[in-house]
Image (cartoon, rainbow, N blue to C red):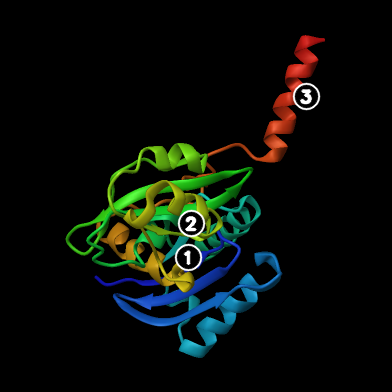
Amino acid sequence: MSPTLLTIQTASPAGSIALTAGERLLAELNLDVRQTPTEWLLQSIGDLLDKTDVKKADLDAIAVVKGPGSFTGLRVGLATAKGLSLALGCPLLGISSLQCLAMQLPFSAMPVCVMLDARKQEVYSASYRWEGGYPYPVTEERVVGPELLLSGVSSETLFAGNGAQVYRTLIVRKLGDRAHFAPAFINLPRAAGAAALAQREWQAGRTFSADELMPNYLRPSEAELNLLNRKKSGNSG
């Protein structure tokens, strides 16, 4: 069965939602605005459903990008997806933001190294190879300094993501003409790419309940670090 999916991407500064029926993209909205997803997400989902004449009851599953990425964006996206899942009684599908971006660079002959800016002079990163119309991960997802990441790259590589833009000068200095870069408009994950990955997850039966699907932050939040530091300070006292 080809599912009808609502896909939510709020892991990056530019948010995105998409409606798909099987492999057909019915509609997609991409927003790069100075607003949190809380301010536009629910209204935009309603607008997309209205404009495509898709009812909430028609949705077979809710797909959501689970990270890594913006902590606030991920929390809002997952909370919205889980709320809809519970209200509609449909399952969830969890998609990697890094693989989602690699999905936007089909049939690359070179390895695709995705770099999303994690701030603190670090990036969220993983590398992929295209095989059989699909980006297969060849490294684990990690948060890493760009210098250390690039020390492990020796062959011609296609770099993508806003982290590749931020550290482009460093990448070129380290790799020279072995470094290739995706066009600027591809450098943020899109819901349509996540929806294509979600189709595979659906067919493989890899669905989740609201209780089961967790965000993939890759590192603790500032609040968690502050709490840990306070505990350490208390113990040392």
Q: Nearer the viewer, residue 89 or 16?
A: 16
Q: Is residue 150 above or below residue 19?
A: above
Do callouts 2 and 1 mark residues in contact (Cβ within 8 Å)? Answer: yes
Q: Which mark is residue 187?
A: 1
Q: Quadrant of the C terminus?
A: top right
* Residue 214 visible in the displayed image: no
Q: Nearer the viewer, mark 2 or mark 1?
A: 2
Residue at 26% over, 57% down: 110
State how far apart marks 3 and 2 are (Cα): 35 Å
Q: Position of residue 78 (x, y in %)?
A: 56, 56
Give the left or right position of residue 150, taking residue 197 as reference: right
- Residue sitting at the far top: 237
Residue labelled with disc 2? 164
Question: Which callout, 2 or 1, points at the residue further toward the start of the chain?
Answer: 2
Q: Is residue 69 above or below residue 229?
A: below
Dot 1: what SS? loop
Q: Nearer the viewer, residue 14 or 56?
A: 14
State how far apart marks 1 and 3 are (Cα): 37 Å
Amino acid on which disc 3 is placed: Arg
State how far apart marks 2 and 1 are (Cα): 8 Å
Q: Is residue 193 above or below residue 177?
A: below
Q: Position of residue 22 (x, y in %)?
A: 30, 75
Dot 3: what SS? helix
Residue labelled with disc 3? 230
Q: Position of residue 236 (x, y in %)?
A: 77, 10
Question: Which callout, 3 or 2, points at the residue further toward the start of the chain?
Answer: 2
Amino acid on which disc 2 is placed: Ala
Q: Position of residue 94 (x, y in %)?
A: 42, 54
